[in-house]
Image (cartoon, coloured by chain):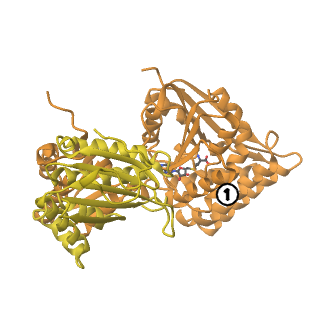
């Protein structure tokens, strides 16, 4: 399904209109999927998430904890992409380990998704929910109501608000693309 | 043909528990029928409390969570007579935040990290005070154990797992002496692992890896190690069979599981044999109050056999002041004295008198070690068994 891309690309993976911003410096894993193929089976989300998590974490400290977190987080992003995407184009996936800075070391996952107007609206909704001043209360209300007002798409909201992962969502209507970036702290003592 | 579900869910009426396991990542409600049936079966039967045991659920997607949250909400609101307890494992990093948040929303729902209070003596052992105990014991035991490891089948080039590795000395010594392919050492004390990792980094040792994990639900693969060790640890658990099951599971067919445990009430010394005997029995009693069995040593063989291991062999390391370094032996007992009079006395509500008596008994033990004509002995039982070829 995936086409590995040489890591010396000056720009993130993808061609022409499917290119997503970001450098491939410190990349550990990159793949590109035709969205039609990817979205042809719901099981692809889990298969890709488990594979990538296993591949990326096997040489990092505390690999079981990171594997579990990365698989969980990436799976949610991929399930969102499975449900909300445009008809054509590529899904780009990049996992990097930025140089460790003051905040310790981390893993960064960037998923670029082709998005039609309904999909763009769903990603915008997530971004607004996450950035809202009352975000936690809103999320708690969604849980209390049994997620009736935000089925499925609340997955990204949950990811950002409940776990210690940093999530950034960007939509570009002119290019018909959405990008979800997730940063997971790899410090061992975090839980 | 129906596809086998990647998760399981079962209601256990005797425990008032719905037990989940595996990976629950459904695309929609249609994959969740077994969960809905379990809830309705459970609600028809239980009163007082219902446990949702989620500790072996390795993955859960948002859709699965939303449905469980919906079921929890229905129970919490419709059955205010019922307490709902969500039991999660802190080894699965995403589980506590998710379910603790859920528990905040309804007064009759609580979430518990089970491995925080997993074995009754945990609050005593998982302490900085215990680091000198583990370090000095390992140092004393190694010169003997090295030989027994060989006898029980450890060879160079093997993949080894050390479960309940504590402060990690054993993994390091083993790595140096046996040149294994790799050693994966697991414990669920963050402070012990931090200590262990620092040592390995400082010594620049490769092929030794420490992992945070729960010995009763290891994240290691089936049939993946040639030699699986678990030392001085079955004795601190109230349900050792849960760990033996996992040791068996991760061992390769043809590989061996190796465990050690004390027989503390048979430690002895003279002069002052009575005072020493009283101290050793006192220690067994103190640990018993915390659900631990410091006399587990010879019983291990039965657990190995019950789990299906064959060729079970027993040996006894008889540490004494003539076959071991006396000052190393003294250090072990001194570290016990520190623990007895500190955390352990507090946890078991000992009177000052009882603590003093035990302390002086162990001082006599040290005296016996150093005495020109004295004797002091401490027996450690080794049991190992072979996993049959499948
Ligand atoms: C008495 S110590 C023995 C340590 C080590 N094997 C040694 O000989 O030095 C018992 C160890 O079991 C660990 N332990 C307790 N519960 C555990 C669990 N559920 N999973 C993994 N390790 C656990 C404790 O943190 C402690 O390090």
Q: Is mark 1 within 8 Å of ligand 1?
A: no
Q: Residue at x 37, y 50 (%)?
A: A68
In the rendered image, is residue B52 in sight? no
Name the foreground residue: A25 vs B113: A25
Image location (x, y in percent) of residue A47: 29, 41
In the rendered image, is residue B240 in sight? yes
Image location (x, y in percent) of residue A37: 20, 40
- The image shows residue A62, relative to residue B342, as above or below, that is above
For residue A31, which quarter of the picture?
A: top left
For residue B239, which quarter of the picture?
A: top left
Q: Residue at x 19, y 73 (%)?
A: A138
- The image shows residue B313, relative to residue A17, as above or below, that is above
Q: Residue at x 38, y 61 (%)?
A: A183
Chain letter behind tag 1 = B
Residue receiving disc 1:
B132
Location of the C terminus of chain B by quadrant is: top left
Image location (x, y in percent) of residue B1: 14, 27
Q: In the image, A181: left or right of A25?
A: left
Q: Residue at the bottom extreme?
A: A133
Q: Residue at the top extreme?
A: B389
Chain with colour orange in the figure: B
Q: Residues within 10 Å of mark 1 (few under 14, many from 20)?
A: some
- Give SS at disc 1: helix
Q: In the image, A178: left or right of B155?
A: left
Name the foreground residue: B277 vs A20: A20
Q: Residue at the right extreme?
A: B372
Name the foreground residue: B185 vs B28: B28
Identify the colour of chain A in the image: yellow
Q: In the image, A37: left or right of B175?
A: left
């Amino acid at each position: 399904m995936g086409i590995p891309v040489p890591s010396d690309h000056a720009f993130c993976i993808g061609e022409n209109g499917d290119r997503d911003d970001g450098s491939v410096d410190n990349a550990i894993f990159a793949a590109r999927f035709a969205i039609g193929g990817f979205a042809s089976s719901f099981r692809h989300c889990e298969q890709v998430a488990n594979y990538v998590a296993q591949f990326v974490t096997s040489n990092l400290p505390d690999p079981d904890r990171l594997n579990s977190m990365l698989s969980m987080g990436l799976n949610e992003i991929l399930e969102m992409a499975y449900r909300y995407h445009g008809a054509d184009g590529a899904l780009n996936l990049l996992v990097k380990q930025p140089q460790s800075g003051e905040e310790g070391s981390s893993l960064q996952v960037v998923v670029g998704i082709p998005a039609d107007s309904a999909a763009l609206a769903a990603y915008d909704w997530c971004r607004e929910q996450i950035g809202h001043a009352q975000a936690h209360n809103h999320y708690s209300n969604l849980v209390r109501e049994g997620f009736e007002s935000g089925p499925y798409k609340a997955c990204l909201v949950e990811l950002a608000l409940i776990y210690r992962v940093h999530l950034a969502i960007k939509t570009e209507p002119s290019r018909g693309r959405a990008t979800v970036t997730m940063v997971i702290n790899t410090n061992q003592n975090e839980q | 043909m129906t596809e086998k579900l990647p998760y399981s869910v079962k209601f256990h009426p005797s425990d008032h528990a719905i037990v989940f396991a595996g990976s629950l990542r459904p695309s929609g409600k249609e994959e969740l029928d077994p969960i809905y049936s379990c809830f309705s079966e459970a609600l028809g039967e239980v009163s007082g409390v219902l446990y949702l045991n989620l500790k072996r659920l390795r993955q859960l997607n948002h859709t699965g969570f939303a449905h469980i949250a919906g079921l929890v909400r229905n129970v919490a609101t419709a059955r205010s007579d019922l307490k709902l307890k969500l039991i999660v494992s802190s080894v699965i990093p995403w589980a506590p935040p998710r379910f603790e948040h859920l528990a905040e929303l309804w007064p009759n729902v609580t979430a518990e990290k089970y491995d925080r209070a997993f074995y009754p003596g945990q609050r005593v052992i998982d302490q900085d005070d215990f680091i000198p105990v583990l370090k000095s014991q390992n140092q004393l035991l190694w010169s003997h154990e090295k030989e027994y490891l060989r006898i029980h089948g450890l060879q160079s080039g093997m993949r080894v797992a050390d479960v309940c590795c504590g402060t990690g000395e054993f993994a390091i010594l083993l790595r140096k002496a046996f040149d294994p392919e790799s050693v994966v050492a697991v414990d669920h004390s963050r402070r012990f692992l931090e200590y262990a990792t620092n040592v390995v980094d400082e010594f620049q040792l490769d092929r030794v890896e420490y992992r945070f994990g729960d010995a009763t639900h290891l994240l290691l693969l089936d049939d993946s190690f040639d030699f699986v060790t678990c030392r001085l640890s079955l004795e601190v658990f109230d349900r050792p069979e849960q760990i033996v099951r996992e040791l068996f599971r991760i061992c390769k067919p043809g590989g061996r599981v190796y465990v050690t445990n004390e027989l503390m009430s048979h430690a002895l010394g003279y002069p002052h044999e009575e005072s020493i005997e009283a101290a050793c029995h006192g220690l067994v009693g103190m640990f018993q109050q915390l659900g631990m069995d410091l006399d587990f040593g010879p019983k291990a063989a039965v657990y190995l056999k019950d789990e299906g291991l064959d060729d079970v062999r027993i040996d006894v390391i008889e540490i004494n002041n003539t076959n071991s370094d006396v000052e190393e032996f003294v250090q072990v007992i001194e570290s016990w004295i520190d623990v007895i009079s500190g955390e352990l006395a507090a946890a078991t509500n000992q009177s000052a008198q009882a603590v003093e008596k035990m302390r002086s008994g162990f001082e006599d033990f040290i005296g016996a070690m150093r005495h020109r004509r004295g004797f002091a002995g401490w027996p450690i039982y080794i049991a190992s068994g072979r996993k049959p070829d499948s």
